[in-house]
Image (cartoon, rainbow, N blue to C red):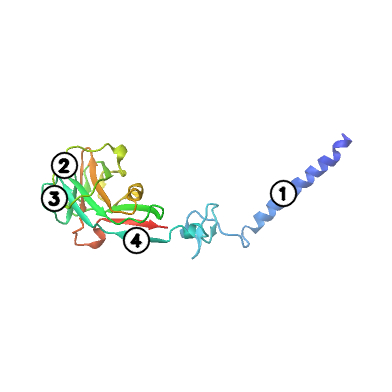
Amino acid sequence: MAKYAPRIADFIKRRCALAAAAALAIALEGCGAAPGCARSSECEAGLVCGLDGRCGPLRAPASARFAASRWLTPTDWGTAGAGEPLGDALPVGGASEALLAFGPMPAPSRLARALLVLSPHARRPRLARDVELVAERVGAFRGGALPARHAVLPTDFAAAVRRLPEGPARRVRLDVTRAARDADGGALHLLVRVRGEGALTFASPWADEPASRPRLELMVR
């Protein structure tokens, strides 16, 4: 047993050193250590809540991830199958589909994210049932009141799909980043439709309130 005595003594010393370090860390918790947080709003000005649950400065590369952000308004638009002239409303559902063109897109390597933003129209303030909204990338079109399509693509090929719950109509954001990158620096043409039953009415590019008009929010590196 005597031959193991040095090892046992060394083990005890190391355990004591670890315990002392832990006690010191606890003592410093309220003395100069970064405060704990659950969200950035709990941190002081200029600090954010990090993954370790501590407030600290936003460091690169996160702080330099996006060099710029900008909005694009439609360069052209129309409806398919709506059966009525264009106005300040953009009906989607049933036989009616919305068409929106944006462009040109940034180079794919610079495009970090692209969100299609649609705002509800006062004509339809509520959704009577759950609705599945689908955005598809389509070929170039000339805007206006167009005839309905004869067939639709499966949602497997959709640029974005989002389920909207029954209740008050709210602003919708659809992530169409992949479709925007596929445009390869050219124009992006999108068709928005409802899969199955249900209908929505969004504000069109001719809406009186500019903030309600459709837009494409881009985050560019």
Which residue lies most toward the left here? 84
In percent of the image, x 35 and y 56: which residue is there?
106
Q: Which of 153 and 175 is in front in this view?
A: 153
The x, y position of residue 126, in whole percent, is: 22, 48
The residue to which callout 4 is attached is 70
Element type at mark 3:
strand
Distance Cα–Cα, label 3 vs label 2: 13 Å
3 or 1: tag closer to the N-terminus? 1
Instruction: Determine which of the numbered discs, if any, sits on residue 28 in the image.
Output: none
Side of 97 relative to 31 (left or right): left
Q: Name the residue under label 2.
A: 95
In three-dimensional space, the C-alpha distance between marks 3 and 1, rounded to whole angstroms, equals: 76 Å
Tell me the quarter of the picture where residue 158 sits.
top left
Q: Which of the marked residues, 3 or 2, is nearer the chain's N terminus?
A: 2
Tell me the amino acid under the disc marked 3.
Ala
Question: What amino acid does circle 1 point to?
Answer: Ala
The residue beneath circle 1 is: 19
Label 1, label 4: how far apart the Cα atoms are: 53 Å
Front disc: 3 or 2? 3
How far apart marks 4 and 3 lie (CA) works out to 29 Å
User: Which of the two labelled residues, at mark 4 and mark 3, occupies the earlier sequence position?
Assistant: 4
Q: Mark 3 points at which residue?
A: 145
As helix, strand or loop, the secondary structure at mark 2 comes to: loop
Q: Can residue 89 be seen in this view?
A: yes
| Mark 1 closeness class: few <14, some 14–19, many ≥20 residues within 10 Å | few
Distance (Cα) linking label 2 and label 4: 33 Å
Q: Earlier in the sequence, mark 1 or mark 2?
A: 1
Residue at the top extreme, as displayed: 1
Contact between marks 1 and 2 (CB within 8 A): the answer is no
Q: Earlier in the sequence, mark 1 or mark 4?
A: 1
Amino acid at circle 4: Arg
